[in-house]
Image (tube, helix red, strand yellow):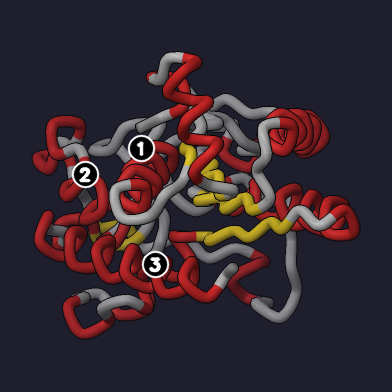
Amino acid sequence: MNLAEMTWQQAQAAFSRTDLAIIPTGAVEVYGPHLPLGSDGIVAQDLAQRLAKRVEAVVTPLIPVGDSRSLMSFPGTISVSPAAFRGYIQDLSASLVHWGIKRILFINGHAGNVAPVADLGLELAPSGIRVAQVDYWKVIATMAPEILDTGLMANRHAGEIGTSALLAVRPDLVDMTKAAQVVPRPTLASGHPEVALSDIPFSALTDLGMTGNATTATAEKGEIMISRLVDKLMDFLKDWR
């Protein structure tokens, strides 16, 4: 059960049974014409809830917004600075530690959240508090490559993988009549993949706020990938004592 849905007595009992907290994080940003802006967090919450059904853990409310500055050219995208996000997770973690938590697993649905979480882990390590994170969009493609139809494009923004995950988790929020196939426009970055560039807006790549082929997505693909990822995370948690 999510901590926000517990009574204080239920929370007290939960903290007495476990030293593990799971924190889902997401973003509110353009995710194609067929998916909701909060897709990253929606999947992160689902993963956290699935884990909590199989392991004793306290799950916090979703941290819904991250650093999405590179997508601000699309309406609806909202963003917080890395410093603000870092301060928020620092204070949240301190509250959990106050109640006896010693291990914190971030289910990370947005690349912009990765660095602040890693920095927090380094800060807390000397005090004996352990922090881990899974950047799930980065690893979910490795869970079932044999079922994917679009190769290297499968894990592009709101493409086959992202759409399949949302179809598995919240099909009511997906409009497959608007799913599209978008080959990103070439930019300086695509011509020089050996160099990281941070000043190219996402709108330079696409007019639809997505890349890849979302039309190949299915709920079945999403369920297979998500289930296998949860199994892998359970293996990790058994070893992370």
Q: Residues within 10 Å of mark 2 (few under 14, many from 20)?
A: many
Residue at which label 2 appears? 169
Q: Residues within 10 Å of mark 1 (few under 14, many from 20)?
A: many
- Which is more toward the observer, 175 or 51? 51
- Verify CB contact (< 8 Å) between mark 3 and mark 2: no
- Rendering coords of residue 76 (x, y %): 47, 22
- Which is more toward the observer, 130 or 178? 130
- Rendering coords of residue 169 (x, y %): 21, 44
Q: Residues within 10 Å of mark 3 (few under 14, many from 20)?
A: some
Classify residue 101 by image quadrant.
top right
Asked if residue 34 is positioned above or below residue 144 in the image, the reply reads above
Task: Work out how far the residue at label 1 is from the one at label 3, CA to CA, in angstroms.
Answer: 20 Å
Residue type at the position of mark 1: Ile
- Which is more toward the observer, 182 or 27? 27
Question: Would residue 35 be visible to someone looking at this image?
Answer: yes
- Verify CB contact (< 8 Å) between mark 2 and mark 1: yes
Q: Quadrant of the C terminus?
A: bottom right
Badge 1 or badge 3: first in the primary sequence? 1
Asked if residue 28 is positioned above or below residue 116 in the image, the reply reads above
Residue at which label 1 appears? 42
Q: Nearer the viewer, mark 1 or mark 3?
A: 3
